[in-house]
Image: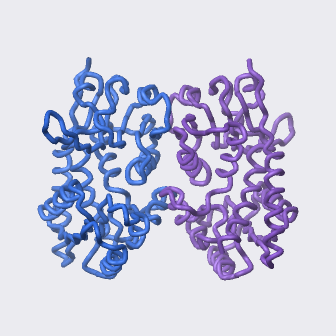
Chain colours: A purple, B blue
Amino acid sequence: MISTKIVNGKEIADKFCEEIKEKVSKIKQRGIFPTVALINVGDDSASNVYISKKQRIAEAIGISSRIYKFTAHADENELAELIWQLNTDDDVHAILLQSPLPPNIEFRKLVDLIRPDKDVDGLTTVNQGKLFSGASGSVPCTSLGILHLLRTVHKKLEGLHAVVLGRSFIVGRPLSQLLLNANCTVTVIHSFSKNITNVCKTADVLISAIGKPRFVTKNFIKQGATIIDVGINRVEENGKKRIVGDVDLENTLGIAGAITPVPNGVGPMTVAYLMHNTLELTYCR
Amino acid sequence: MISTKIVNGKEIADKFCEEIKEKVSKIKQRGIFPTVALINVGDDSASNVYISKKQRIAEAIGISSRIYKFTAHADENELAELIWQLNTDDDVHAILLQSPLPPNIEFRKLVDLIRPDKDVDGLTTVNQGKLFSGASGSVPCTSLGILHLLRTVHKKLEGLHAVVLGRSFIVGRPLSQLLLNANCTVTVIHSFSKNITNVCKTADVLISAIGKPRFVTKNFIKQGATIIDVGINRVEENGKKRIVGDVDLENTLGIAGAITPVPNGVGPMTVAYLMHNTLELTYCR
């Protein structure tokens, strides 16, 4: 049994936000006011929570945020119209299209209307291509936040075997590219994979982004491995609603070397990197 | 000891080219003449060989090819000028910028001048982004050729563990995306990876694209695994120049389930998919 370190993402994010705040204050002295537009479509309760968190942190840091709220019945043209407006609005430096969108609206089509140099979450085809082909561009906030957390645990990522559970275009795939760029050996696992526990057990770093409550237990974990839990799953237990991760944290204590909790693990880092990327896009203008 | 199948890439490519030839002949009856422009810069002897092979196969299939040959002293503007011309030439459906380029010319910058809908090897940032984000676009020829070879060996790729040696933007990375899309578990290994032989030994499918002569031996291979050798390495042995792969084929016989030789493995498939992609771009116009 070893002593498992609980990685306090909230604390790390708060510290990082302090650094961003200082930079924001400097750029404002030059008369430039970093501004992010947050587009929220539909009635997804999680999205509403995220958006208000993002707004609150932006305010605390000194970044202006504008919320554009649409009902689930919004049509694509209306949203496209807004994106075009924001693209040409010199006061807006960054645009975020909060996912998920209602089923009648195609995310890929809409997100690709965002100007790549205002694409704060790096999800346009051009920015995904840049990440994939080694050029510089916006990189998805969650993946950047995860790398940041890993660097607080490991002085050197080079040569570590990172196993990523999940191959989504939002987390799993961009993250696997960042880990490759950081010179990790990278394995991507998904719903069709076999011998999942055995493969996970070879990981020095195990990252779960599959959205299955408490799917990862100690059987998946090599002694001393670092576990990053990206899952945010809403469950009802004993008549109470609560949020749990993809990892059964308590079950892994004494085996994992370090683990991020849910909440207060990856979540705050995603928000912090939204601020970071907004500032970067403001600089680059 | 098992009997190792030698996968005859030449034969498979010839058969595939026959199918393409029929389609080419049909589209020509409609007065459309598929045409590929091949840009060859510098004096790389391998490039010269590839370009003439591509030209020869194109001719055999009925695809028109135009060769644009530049010395190593060509400047970027001159090449950019040509690409702009070809982009707007309605008679040209496909453009290939043969790599490697001389060191003074930046590949990424030039390749991104190619119109994505004429980018026959899928190496523009936009097409790399499309592959990465799950949209349809041109996909690199070598990766498509490898998938084709794998499908001749395995009825089903789903759930297989594919280990890719090499993380280049030309082969390793796009291939890893195609393998993920084919529902393989995918591990990418590179020069900073550790325990390489152990990780390779977990592979159902092992693909080497690192350019190290005979690097992969039987110690890397699980009994019955399929080995794809993408390496084309020029070596001198006993005073004779010859081409060898990344894999020591003879050493793996009796252990590998199937293996592609060099030459006559992946090489002919790359050329065949150049023809396939040229025809696709002609259709899509």
Viewer-proximal residue among B28 and A239: B28
Q: Is residue B143 left or right of residue B198?
A: left
- B17 above or below A91? above
Q: Where is residue A89 drawn, in percent x and y?
A: 70, 82
Q: Is residue A163 left or right of residue B150?
A: right
Q: How many marks?
A: 0
- In which image quadrant can residue A260 be found? top right
- A223 above or below B284? above
Query: Which residue corresponds to the image point at 36% horizontal and 56% vertical from the top-left?
Result: B140
Q: Where is residue A188 drawn, in percent x and y?
A: 53, 40
Q: Looking at the image, can residue B89 be seen?
A: yes
Viewer-proximal residue among B74 and B138: B74
Viewer-proximal residue among B172 and A173: B172
Q: Looking at the image, can residue A190 be seen?
A: no
- A29 above or below B72? below
Query: Which residue corresponds to the image point at 46% horizontal and 45% vertical from the top-left?
Result: B180
Q: Quadrant of the C terminus of chain A?
A: bottom right
Q: Quadrant of the N terminus of chain A?
A: top right
Q: Where is residue A158 drawn, in percent x and y?
A: 57, 39
- A62 above or below B156? below
Query: Which residue corresponds to the image point at 85% horizontal and 67% vertical from the top-left?
Result: A62
Query: Which residue corresponds to the image point at 64% horizontal and 80% vertical from the top-left?
Result: A84
Q: Where is residue A189 drawn, in percent x and y?
A: 54, 38
- In which image quadrant can residue A119 be found? bottom right
